[in-house]
Structure formats: structure tokens, C-alpha cells
Amino acid sequence: MPTLVAKPPQGDGWTHEVKFDGYRSQIIIDAGRARVFTRRGLDWTSKYRDLAATAKTLDVENAIIDGEIIVLDDKGLSDFAELRKAITRRQHDLYFVAFDLLHLNGHDLRDMAVEERREILEGVIPLDIRIQFSQALPGEANAIYHLVDQAGLEGMVSKRLGSKYVSGPTTNWLKTKCYTIGEFELLGVEREQGKPTFALMAEPGTRKYVGSAFVSINREMRERLWKRVQEHAGPPPKNMPTRPATQWVKPGIKARVKHLRGEEDLRHASLQDFWDE
């Protein structure tokens, strides 16, 4: 499991790949069978029957392949929102993006260097099937990050050259996510002396809480925000836990928030602007 970092690692000691927005999965091929497991070890072969059938066509006796199951949008980008629909309704639209190989034909490869494992993996996967190899991105880390961001991708994963495969969290794999801007509804402002101020955000229309955004706007705008919050003071939304330092507001205030791309809830979010609906 890669560690989240703010910036990609620099230098020649790393290899970089696209971070795909899907379900981390593992394909196990053995004795003429192919099974697909989730990150938590659940056997989802029946849900991924087409990919399992494709895996059986690989020219191996047995293998354990690490990767991500994705579905693509009309721009060719992985689309997490459509993934669940594709699993139940559009099996033929699923892809497995393979990025590591733990075991092959009776040999445990985890102690090999990551670049050696990936070289073997690339040779195992044909070019024209729905199991695809995750290609390394050439170039300098910051330039790669810029291109990934401009392309609208979720982010990038950097792997330390020479590193072994270790289960669990590791700093040999680092993920750098890209940011995006979204519009949300303001639920309230959490303001406590001596601590940062946070705006509590919700999905527009549903008022379902999705996380908090750091209020990093300038002093004049902070004061204007606080005035607006006091003018629109209201009761807390239903099903929200008690937050003593929070001033809740009535519906009607929209906000623009910068946050990490590819997350269900807001992470590393900051308030950029707000206005009356």
C-alpha cells in the first residue's frame, strides 16, 4: 500500500506510473483456474467473470498479479463513479491494469527488485486483451506530475528502484494525488480560538456531509464569510453529530473547494470562494 505524499520524489532512484482510479485487486492463476480477489481478500471472481476468463488465456502455469480494475470514460480516463455500474451491467467494459508480479510458474518473485518483476510481468501480458500492463512514465518527476494533472488523471505512483515487494503500508511506494475544484453547499463553519477555521461542506441539494475544507482565504473574505454565516444561522442538519464549536447555517450558500481528485469525501481540501445560491 503506497504512502500518500504532497509531492513526487525526486532523483533517478524512482520509477513512476499513472495512479488509476479503480479497485485494487489481485489475480491468481493456478491449475487452469483464475480467481480475482479484492484488497481485503474477498473472492470476487463471480463479479469479474470476464476478466477471470481473460486471465486464463495468459501463457503461464501459475501466477499472482497485482493491479487495479477500472472502467474508462469517453475520454479514456478511469472513472470510479461508473465502475460499480460496469461490474453489474457492463462486464465487457472492465480492464485490469497490471503493475506488479508476485509469483510466476512456481517462483516467488517478491524479493526481486521492482523493475525486474515488472520487466517479467510486461513479457507475460499480450497487447490486445483487457488485462493491460501499467507502463512506466519517462521523464522528470515534477514534469510527469504536471502532465498527469493536466490530463485529468487521479495522480501518480512512484516506486523506489531496487525495492522488494512488501505487504502492507510502505514508503517504497509513494502516491501523489492531483487536485480538482468542485462546488459544494456550506453546512456551517467550525471556528475555535487558537485553531484553524474549517468550513463544513455537503453535496449540493442533498446536504449530505462530505467533509471539511480549510478556510485559507484572505482576512477580508474570512470576515465576510463569518458575517454571512451569522446572518444565515440555522439548526444543525439531521444526523450530524454535535460539534460545539460549529455555527450552522440555513441552506442557500454555495462554495468552491479545492480538494484531492479521486476521493469519495473531501481530503486536503481548502475553501476558495463562496456565494449565495
Image (cartoon, rainbow, N blue to C red):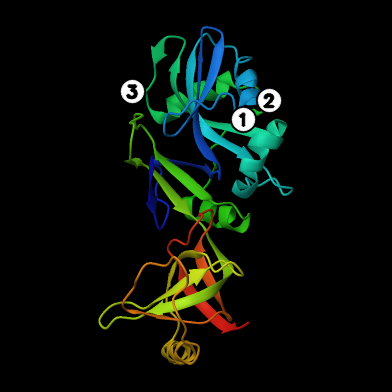
Q: Which residue is mark 2?
A: 129
- How far apart marks 1 and 2 lie (CA) works out to 7 Å
- Image quarter hosting the C terminus: bottom right
Q: Crowdedness of circle 1 by 10 Å Cα count: few (<14), some, many (20+)?
A: some
Horizontally, is 251 left or right of 157 in the view? Answer: right
Q: Label 2's element?
A: loop
75 and 151: which is toward the camera: 75
Identify the residue at horizontal 68%, vertical 25% (top origin): 129
What label does residue 177 carry, if any? none
Chain-order first, disc 1 or disc 3: 3
Horizontally, is 179 left or right of 78 in the view? Answer: left
Q: Crowdedness of circle 2 by 10 Å Cα count: few (<14), some, many (20+)?
A: some
Q: Which residue is mark 1?
A: 132
Task: Give above or below for 182 relative to 7.
Answer: below
Identify the residue at horizontal 41%, vertical 79% (top origin): 189
Q: Crowdedness of circle 3 by 10 Å Cα count: few (<14), some, many (20+)?
A: few
What amino acid type is highlighted by mark number 1? Gln
80 and 12: which is toward the camera: 80
**Residue 220 coordinates in the image, percent (x, y):** 45, 92
Q: Which residue is mark 3?
A: 111
